[in-house]
Amino acid sequence: MSKHLINLEDLEREGIQELLHLTDRFVEVTQRPIPKVPALRGRTIAMLFFEDSTRTRMSFDLAAKRLSADVLEFPTHTSSLSKGESIRDTVETIHSLGVDALIIRHNLNGLPKEIADGVGEAPSVINAGDGSNSHPTQGLLDAYTLCEHFHGSAGPQASLSGIHIGIIGDVRHSRVARSDVYAYNALGATVTIVAPKSLQPSDLTDWPVQISEDLDAVLPTLDVVGLLRIQNERMEEALVDSIEEYVESYGMTEARAAVLRDEVVITHPGPVNRGVELAETVLENRKNVLIKQQVKNGVPVRMAVLFRLLGSGVEID
Ligand code: CP
């Protein structure tokens, strides 16, 4: 396995299964009275979040601390970026301080790969979400959450075979959709993208998915309703006529939730636009809404990634 994690395509099916199986072990660690192991003692992990984040940033931070690594925060708003220092020089400066991993989120597609190509084998570069391109640890945690829900854990041969997953909404701007599709497909699930033409990416016909614009036609066939956030910050023009029309055609409203089989699960990477992708009452009251479990699993999944990339030859305990 590479020393970097830039996208899930680099891992392929076996690499994804290996990380999900390792996650089983870190779920056990996080359930202990003292959920901390010395595995990465002496390692330093720098967090370079050039774009806002709550879940990814805090769970990487917690994952690193639970592995006993030192965490170096990079405060973008008070750094020398404000004096015109380039990202390249910033990365070289942090590299010179002596870090073992750079966790990078940026709104530019491909920036983590560019940085990884520049640093060579060390430090490890981990993509925490780049533009609309890739969010590999979200893909891993979403796949883990579904394996855990349907099978109790990932196990050595994690599989989502026989499960039909819908990914619904703003696929065009979604790095999560790209990583989820790769992970779900690699684990044997059937995936259907449901979105209006204006929110479908131009290369969608190359994806290993079925495609529909009609949520109500697809809904009765789904085992998993994977909702996506409408990403207003990435839209250069209005791609939906109105929020009301979007909710009417693609929102998980109370009426739509009422016709779902009880065992159908709902996922969303967060943050949720309440009342748009998902009705407040469905979010609060429906059984099998896995959003909090997705967030919770972000910690052991990211512990597995950090341990796999930085803990070569080290025991977990
Ligand atoms: N799902 C996700 O990436 O959330 P954050 O932007 O809060 O990290």
Image (cartoon, rainbow, N blue to C red):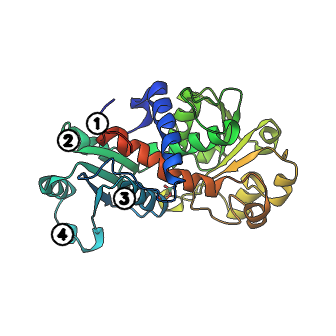
Q: How many marks?
A: 4
| Contact check, label 2 and label 4, Cβ < 8 Å | no
Say which quarter of the image contains residue 283: bottom right
Q: Earlier in the sequence, mark 2 or mark 4?
A: 4
Query: Residue 36, how many percent across, how many down?
Result: 41, 55
Residue on which disc 1 sits: 3
Alpha-carbon span between mark 2 and mark 3: 21 Å
The residue at the far left in this view is: 96
Where disc 4 sits, the SS reads helix
Alpha-carbon span between mark 1 and mark 3: 20 Å
The residue sitting at 75% across, 38% down in the picture is 223
Query: Residue 126, how many percent across, how many down?
Result: 34, 46
| Contact check, label 2 and label 1, Cβ < 8 Å | yes
In front of the other: label 2 or label 3?
Answer: 3
Q: Earlier in the sequence, mark 4 or mark 3?
A: 3
Assign the C terminus to one quadrant of the image: top left
Say which quarter of the image contains residue 230: bottom right
Neighbour tally class for label 1: few under 14, some 14-19, many 20 plus, Cα within 10 Å: some
Where disc 3 sits, the SS reads helix
Q: For residue 109, say whether it is visible.
A: no
Q: Earlier in the sequence, mark 2 or mark 1?
A: 1
| Disc number for residue 80 | 4
| Disc number for residue 65 | 3
Q: Which amino acid type is shown beneath numbered disc 2?
A: Ala
In front of the other: label 1 or label 3?
Answer: 3
Query: Residue 15, how many percent across, how many down?
Result: 44, 29
Residue on which disc 2 sits: 122
Q: Which amino acid type is shown beneath numbered disc 4?
A: Ser
Judge by depth and name the residue closer to the eye, 2 or 50. Answer: 2
Assign the N terminus to one quadrant of the image: top left
Residue labelled 1 has its Cβ within 8 Å of some atom of ligand 1: no
